Amino acid sequence: MTGRAPNRLEPTFYSRIPHLIDDSELSPYAVRLYLHYKRVTGDDRADRSMMLPCTESANTLADKLHMSKRSVLSARRELLEADLVTTRRVAGTAGGYGWEVVPTDIWDENVTHYRTRAKERAARAALEDEQRLVAGLAG
């Protein structure tokens, strides 16, 4: 390991996944596709304007992710309906069209949700401790 700091523009070899995704009711196919989008778009960059959209076709995604094209399209629709990705239709190379897909930034929502849960858990624990203390004094 070298002592140099990583360059924010260099690719990373890991992805950070919001806990909301793991705790969601998304299908396994949608979660897998989301993970792939996070990986190929470089969503962990400090400057989101530096992200590159995923332009892989449904057929390419199906091959890479070991699922049917129909499953890919269904999973993408699921991610769109959950507002977890945005898409933009673009001209294709063979005269058709393709899609650019980018994960939606849900980090603020993720932090707020889990920070609130942690505070609620701490408040419940404090109340239970107080109830145990009161019960111990009464007993």
Image (tube, rainbow, N blue to C red):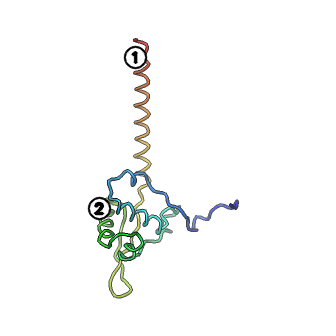
- In the image, taking residue 55 as reference, residue 8 lies left or right, namely right
Residue linked to disc 2: 81
Graded by Cα atoms within 10 Å as few (under 14), some (14 to 19) or many (20 or more), the crowding at tag 2 reads few
Q: Residue furthest right?
A: 3
Image quadrant where residue 17 sits: bottom left
Residue 102 % position (x, y): 41, 67
Q: Nearer the viewer, residue 15 or 4?
A: 15
Q: Which mark is residue 44?
A: none
Q: Residue at x 43, y 37 (%)?
A: 119
Q: Residue furthest bottom?
A: 94
Residue linked to disc 1: 135
Residue 139 % position (x, y): 40, 11
Say which amino acid is labelled 2. Answer: Glu
Establish if 114 lies above or below 52: above
- Secondary element under disc 1, as helix, strand or loop, is helix
Q: Earlier in the sequence, mark 2 or mark 1?
A: 2
- Secondary element under disc 2, as helix, strand or loop, is helix
Image quadrant where residue 5 sits: bottom right
Establish if 137 lies above or below 61: above
Residue 4 % position (x, y): 68, 62
- In the image, taking residue 7 as reference, residue 117 lies left or right, namely left
